[in-house]
Image: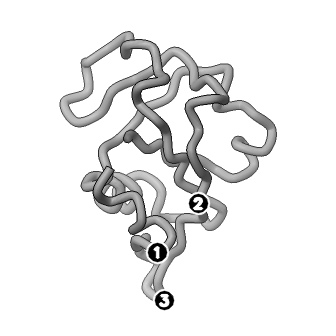
Amino acid sequence: MLFHIAKKSNIKSKKIFSSSVRCWKFNQLISVANKNFKNGREDMAVVCLDSSRLAPPYTYNQPLSDTYDFIPSDSIVDIIDFPKDSKGNFFISNDLANFEHF
């Protein structure tokens, strides 16, 4: 299982299906989100992906993520809101926690 963090508007408009995307492991979600999306981003979601349905990543340049050419729609298992706490930090909701062991 891999995860992609995206604006909800990009998911709804299907922009994530036509451009390269970075995918993360579950244990990286909080640090990546708070480092890259904390300020001014209120409309974020996590796209949960079946990694067996993804083509091999085209680059391993990032030490902690894989970058894929595109995300096939049949690889999407779920899309879950990525909430923030009262201090503006992202946190793992109960719905997202269900994917921790995949």
Q: Relative to residue 53, is residue 81 drawn left or right?
A: right
Q: Residue at x 71, y 42 (%)?
A: 10
The answer to whether mark 1 and mark 2 are in CB contact below 8 A is yes
Q: What element does badge 3 sit on?
A: loop
The quadrant of the picture occupied by the N terminus is top left
Label 2: which residue?
80
Q: Residue at x 35, y 41 (%)?
A: 24
Q: Position of residue 95 (x, y in %)?
A: 51, 70
Q: Position of residue 6 (x, y in %)?
A: 58, 47
Q: Residue at x 40, y 23 (%)?
A: 67
Q: Earlier in the sequence, mark 2 or mark 3?
A: 2
Identify the mark at residue 86; answer none if there is no mark.
3
- Give the amino acid at mark 3: Ser
- Give the amino acid at mark 1: Ser
Q: Earlier in the sequence, mark 1 or mark 3?
A: 3
Crowd class of label 1 (few under 14; some 14 to 19; many from 20; radius 10 Å): few
Q: What element does badge 2 sit on?
A: strand
Is 65 above or below relative to 6? above
- Give the amino acid at mark 2: Ile
Crowd class of label 3 (few under 14; some 14 to 19; many from 20; radius 10 Å): few
User: Front-most of 73 and 61?
Assistant: 73
Label 1: which residue?
93
Q: Relative to residue 30, is residue 17 drawn left or right?
A: right
* Mark 1 or mark 3, whichever is nearer to me: 1
User: Front-most of 52 and 69?
Assistant: 52
**Residues under labels 1 and 3: Cα distance?**
14 Å
